[in-house]
Image (spheres, rainbow, N blue to C red):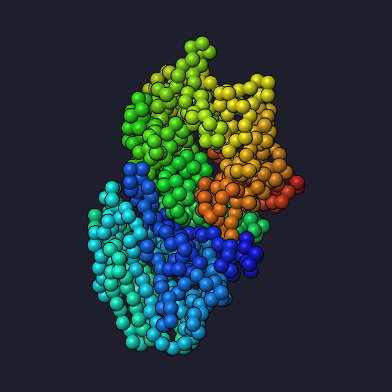
Amino acid sequence: MSANNKIKGNVWELETLSLVPYYRSYLGNGYLGVQVSQDGTGVAADPPVRSFIAGVYDGEYEQLVEIPRWSGIGLFNGKGWLTFDEPEKITGYRQTLDMKRACLRTQYTWEYRGRATDFDITFFISREDAHLAVLRFSIVPHYEGEIVLENSLNADALDNLNLQQRGSEAGDLWLEVMTRTSNVRIAQVLGISCPDKLTGFKQEVDSPGSKQIRQRLRFKVEEGRRYTVYKYVSLFTSYDLEDPLRGARQRIREAESQGYDRLLKAHCDAWNELWESDILVDDHKLQRRIHSAFYHLLSSVREGQDHSIPPMGLSEDGWGGHIFWDAEVFMLPALLLLHPELAKSMVMYRYRTLGAARANATEQGYEGAAYGWQTGRTGKEASRGGPSKEIHITGDVAWGQWQYYLATQDRGYLENYAGQIIIETAKFWASRVTYNENADRYEILGVVPPDESTCEVHGLPTVDNSVFTNAIAQWNLRTAVKVCEILGRDYPAAWKEIADRMYLPFNQERQIYLEYDGYSGHPIKQPDVGEMIFLLEHPMSQEIIAANFDYYREKADRELGHSFFPSVHPIVACRLGRRQEAYELFVEWDGFFLPPFEVMRECLCNEGIVFLTSFGGFLQNFLYGFGGIRIGEDGLKVQPLLPDEFSRIIFKRIFYGGKAYRLIVEKKGGQDSYELKE
């Protein structure tokens, strides 16, 4: 937490009383995301506040589209425009992210040329209505005279957006643009409500830029009087409606009719339902971080969609906003038992893009379905330079589908969706392997392993027999056989043979798996073998698990300090029964949280990034590490291992097989115990 945080016992609010340090968080509802800023609306932000809509991509490599800027509210106090360029002119600063209600409140006084103005701003992206954002903008001027409030919809800086139309009517502004190559129309409508009678009120609308429309509201103010305006913004795309502008205009009229208080209540009620699946601990600092992890993750996923989550979610377009294995391996398991309805949106994305995966396999001369390492809206490979060699993603996707089935026991989903993906990906692996006649084994040659640093740092274009890649291919083939047997379908006998004779590089002397053929013992960016232990749970004896864990823990690149290590290592330590070691590894997370909103970074060597992959890994430590939860074909099992620092963990609501349970893990009589109740 920030040193300025004055609410140490409050587990729901993250607060800063100073302008620095400041690593941006974001507001989102799984459809729409917008970065937060120090001024509260984004009008004075440098760099500019950015905003994104899930599933809207453009360009040859399908980049997540930054939509026209819409959130800022400017103020002219009669002497100058609000700016944060001179921090000494900002006093009484307080900004609070209320994670329970998913609201940002910003309060401060801005003084310029003898005129002081108090600001009190509340901002939320409606969870109840995917297409609505709301701001309450309240000021108290300590002077008399005319002021100006400015709002705009502005795409001038966004070269890949072409203007379709813009206009205004009865105080509302609208702007519709179209993406350059994907031809997606994005419509925004902005409405301002002024419940107070304003003296000398004038409204001016103009278009100062080629893809912008601006509104200025002029009125006279009295010293010490509070003035409040409400800003409603609705956003639709042509994916949502045939006429997105018409839909957005209609929604603004409805929002203005409902009013701020009703909209806020509906939004808070929707978030309250999500928080019914909270994880509770008795440490305030840790509880805030758990809430931050959930808040940031939940803000980028929504029920009823068929989009997945990029590494930075809807907070930014890092890595093109593409979908990677991060979604299946790090984020999906964190949501699966707590929010299966949200997890379904993620797995349905892979089903929607199955056709593209089939095409990707065909184009490379293989059978079945091969998922792209980086994908956007269509599911086509979005990696620059052609299809990526990081093909373990195909097995990762199949693994996520099977996990969803195991957790939900949804036979219909297995029959209609997951089964197809698992079978089609098995076909790919069967066509991708190479039979080594001399050794009588199957190998997978010329791949990039999960630990990409092998290629990026150590100069190898590809490796042969990446142990994680081969292991997940083996798992995929065996699981496809299982699925066919469950569904009463035929399958090729070769699948069993390939799986049984799949080569996994292993050093007999050390009793360790090798990251790949010829692995030299160099430092690693992430624990490929650790990920075989968890999440893949590749069959190994406790002795071999211990040997691999001890060996590769010492190989971790500490200078890089990647979040994949604390995502995996504490859970493996729990499996080995190493209570204190698990906690010591868990504490490594401390360096990944950044103030004031406990956002998480990818590596200890970078800053200023909302890395949802890290949040997912952090939450998995509680679910599958200390909580000891396992889902398998034989049901739900719990084998907790609490460190001395935790007296108990409460999982308020977990779902298994369509039923809701409450799980309490605690120490009783010096022993780890649990209670699971419907």
Q: Is residue 494 above or below residue 90?
A: above
- In the image: residue 538, left or right of residue 123: right
Residue at coordinates 31% horizontally, 82% vertically from top-left?
A: 202
Q: Position of residue 323 (x, y in %)?
A: 43, 43
Q: Is residue 669 above or below residue 151?
A: above
- In the image: residue 290, left or right of residue 196: right
Q: Position of residue 158 (x, y in %)?
A: 34, 57
User: Can I make out residue 64 in this image?
Assistant: yes
Residue at coordinates 45% horizontally, 68% vertically from top-left?
A: 44
User: Can I make out residue 414 in this image?
Assistant: no
- In the image: residue 463, left or right of residue 431: right
Q: Position of residue 397 (x, y in %)?
A: 44, 36
Task: Tell me the quarter of the picture where residue 261 sits.
Answer: bottom left
Task: Tell me the quarter of the picture where residue 598 sits.
Answer: bottom right
Task: Tell me the quarter of the picture where residue 527 sits.
Answer: top right
Residue found farthest to the top: 438
Residue at coordinates 64% horizontally, 42% vertically from top-left?
A: 558
Q: Please state the total of marks drawn on the protein image.
A: 0
Q: Is residue 447 above or below residue 287?
A: above
Q: Is residue 632 above or below residue 155?
A: above
Residue found farthest to the right: 669
Residue at coordinates 45% horizontally, 41% vertically from top-left?
A: 324
- Quarter of the image with the N terminus is bottom right
Q: Position of residue 86 (x, y in %)?
A: 52, 72
Q: Nearer the viewer, residue 590 or 417?
A: 590
Q: Nearer the viewer, residue 547 or 452?
A: 452
